[in-house]
Image (cartoon, helix red, strand yellow):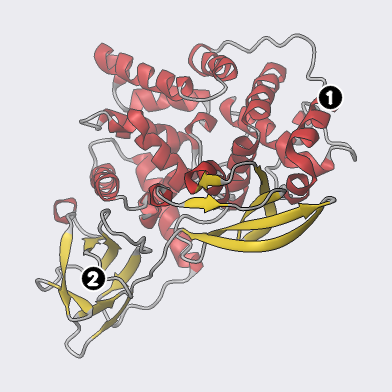
Amino acid sequence: MARLFGYRLLCNQENLVANLYNAKRPGIVLPEFITERSLPLQHFADKVMQLFCLSDPLDGKAEVVLEICDVSNTIQRPIREYRICRYTQKIEYNLDESGGAIIKTEPCLPDLFAVPIECPIQEIALVDLKLDGDSYIFNESPKWAKYIVFSSNSSVVRIKPAFIHLNAEDVQTSTTDRMERIIGYHNGLLAAKPEDDIWQQLLAYYQICVNNDLSLAAFEVFRACSFSSELAAKLYLFLMSYDEFGGFLDGNYRKVEEELEIFFHWVGATYWNKAMEWMGCMSDLRHFDLSSNGINTLFANQHPAKHFSQIRNYVMQDLRPKVDGSIPLNQKISDLRASLGSKVLSGIPSECPKIPDNYKYILPLTTNTYNVKLLLKSPVAVALSIAGLSDSLWCAEREQIRRNVKYSQLLQPQWYAEAVVYSLSKI
């Protein structure tokens, strides 16, 4: 989003609306009436981020469309369109006759780096690539067969990271093979201790990602952490504990949430306790206080604070929220429709988390509320996850569901938080 700084939308007429949507999911539209003649594009940053969250962080074709329309008697006429790309260039490579990698990207030629994967922890380090004409090559003969190549964080262009295989005999892996590898990482992380190699490898990759603005989603070991509430709790406390400069709690945890397509506040309360035991907090008072404060900080940074403080009390002190009466559902739905408008309502994703039959009573669906079912089911699913009663958000096959649940919170944060609190009070 920093790349939007300096750009402005200049308008010379009235009755204009900006419609923003993800080109991969054009039915989900976020409109906003334009009331100023000069508007910085950064003004739309939150909406752009909401819409990018609807597609995979490494989707090279993901882009948000900013469509300017003239409005006359509720009829919209498109007059201009702009596209905000997640990535503006891609990396391609091939192997020469001697097996050396020839790496290309165009038209801009920024500094490129490579980091090895599937290698011992002591070998995890950045490798500078040398520009040779209009191609890039390794300065020295590479020691490993697989690398991730990416651009410098100071680059004026955003280049999609690329996986390169230097063994010509390697066979392209299928989606099934990739999922099996990620599940293998998931199981390995769950079984290992913080000081074991697999966690220390994760830490090394995390530091490279944070220092170089590289997406964590480029590494399968991180994607594995979105498959399990227990593993997400361990990841949070592990990265917080091994963070030497305080950057994790200062905001890097949001990078993790964004790129792994989860929210840490979904984690089950019992898994926080298990993660603290796993980190050795129960035998170290200082470490116990550090971890407890880190979890408290997570919830303190959420908005609206009033509702998330109740969620924090449920997680940290097992205090069930006290809600007088019930949510006036019909009025709430009416308010939601009024605030969102027909264009947004018609585009709300239909794919929702599964709610067990015995909890559907909490925020029941009717024919009148079906078009906002995501806004009803999402907070119930989150509450069930926090209470340890359902892992439906954390299944390996639920990536799109998790994106939709995140979108529901970003779309209506006040309603979402209030509904999670209400659901916890009824469980």
Q: Name the residue under label 2.
A: 145
Q: Position of residue 238 (x, y in %)?
A: 31, 33
> Label 2, label 1: how many angstroms apart (C-alpha)?
60 Å
Left or right of 144, for residue 58: right
| Residue positioned most to the right | 367
**What secondary structure is marked by label 2?**
loop
Q: Nearer the viewer, residue 146 or 128?
A: 128
Q: Residues within 10 Å of mark 1 (few under 14, many from 20)?
A: few
Residue at x-position 22% and y-position 30%: 245
Residue at x-position 30% and y-position 18%: 290
Q: Nearer the viewer, residue 195 or 205?
A: 205
Left or right of 412, for residue 60: left
Residue at x-position 35% and y-position 64%: 159
**Count of numbered circles in the view:** 2
**What secondary structure is marked by label 1?**
helix
Q: Where is residue 307 in the image (x, y as percent from the top left)?
A: 60, 18
Q: Which of 71 and 223 is in front in this view?
A: 71
Q: Position of residue 59 (x, y in %)?
A: 48, 62
Three-letter amino acid code of the residue under disc 2: Ala
Residue at x-position 36% and y-position 60%: 158
| Above or below: residue 387 compared with residue 122 | above
Q: Mark 1 points at which residue?
A: 331
CB under 8 Å between callouts 2 and 1? no
| Residue positioned most to the front | 12
| Residue 392 shows up from this direction | no
